[in-house]
């Protein structure tokens, strides 16, 4: 296993759309293991392959307290279930240090493949539903800051660009 580099906004590769996984093979399983190690090391609760510059529809999530309940979603598709929307404070490993309020549906139905390539379904609510939507946004080239006003988004961009210049 390896810890992968996480792309940071405003890196344009974060805007790439991920391609479906056509075969869950050893390469994808290695990617999943590396993504889990990277996510736990960061530390975060979710990571999309796009964030580690692999443009495949692969997501890993673990919202458990003990970080021992990893969820792998390959080629995930969601349906919004009739329910309310709620505001959640979101952060992102690709937008480090920033947390903003985003409104999302609270209840979803997910179809995906697991790390063995087997199809499964689940219903998710609350934090898990938000996390899944956040990570699927990454697969579609979206970031949580896209839900913010252009002024807030620009302010975050400038601060991160300044940090990147100082680190270079």
Image (tube, rainbow, N blue to C red):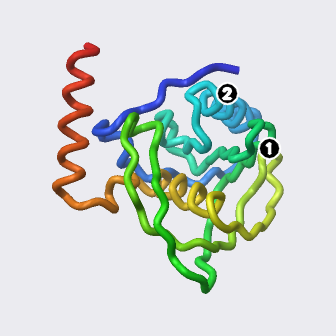
Query: Which of the image's four quarters has the C terminus?
Result: top left
Question: Which residue is painted at 61% across and 70% down in the image?
Answer: 78
Q: SS of the residue at dot 2?
A: helix
What distance separates the C-alpha of mark 1 from that of mark 2?
Answer: 13 Å
Task: Name which residue lies at 72% across and 31% down.
Answer: 33
User: Residue 129 occupies which quadrant of the picture?
Assistant: bottom right
Q: As drawn, which residue projects farthest toward the bottom?
A: 82
Residue 24 seen by the camera: no
Q: Is residue 20 above or below residue 85?
A: above
Instruction: State the residue lying farthest toward the top.
Output: 168
Which residue occupies the foreground of this view, 27 or 154?
Answer: 154
At 71% from the left and 21% from the top, the residue drawn is 1
Disc 1 residue crowd, few under 14, some 14–19, many 20+, Cα 10 Å: few
Q: Which residue is mark 2?
A: 37
Asked whether the beta carbons under mark 1 and mark 2 sit within 8 Å of each other, the answer is no
Q: Is residue 33 visible?
A: yes
Judge from the rendering whether residue 109 lies leftward or rightward of residue 98; answer left or right: right
| Label 1 SS | loop
Query: Which residue does the image show at 41% across and 32% down from the upper left?
Result: 7
Q: Is residue 148 left or right of residue 154?
A: right
Say which mark, if any, is on residue 69: 1
In the picture provided, is 163 more to the left or to the right than 113?
left
Sooner in the amino-acid sequence: mark 1 or mark 2: 2
Q: Is residue 80 above or below residue 68?
A: below
């Amino acid at each position: 296993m390896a810890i992968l580099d996480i792309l940071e906004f405003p890196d344009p590769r974060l805007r790439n759309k991920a391609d479906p996984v056509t075969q869950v093979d050893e390469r994808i399983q290695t990617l999943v293991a590396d993504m889990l190690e990277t996510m736990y090391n960061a530390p975060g609760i979710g990571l999309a392959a796009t964030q580690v510059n692999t443009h495949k529809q692969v997501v890993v999530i673990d919202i458990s307290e003990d970080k021992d309940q990893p969820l792998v979603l390959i080629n995930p598709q969601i349906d919004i279930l009739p329910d309310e929307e709620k505001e959640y404070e979101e952060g992102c490993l690709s937008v480090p240090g920033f947390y903003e309020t985003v409104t999302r549906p609270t209840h979803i139905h997910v179809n995906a493949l697991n790390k063995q390539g087997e199809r499964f379904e689940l219903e998710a609510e609350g934090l898990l539903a938000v996390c899944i939507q956040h990570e699927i946004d990454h697969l579609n080239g979206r970031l949580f800051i896209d839900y913010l006003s252009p002024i807030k988004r620009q302010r975050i961009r400038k601060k991160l660009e300044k940090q990147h210049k100082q680190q270079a």
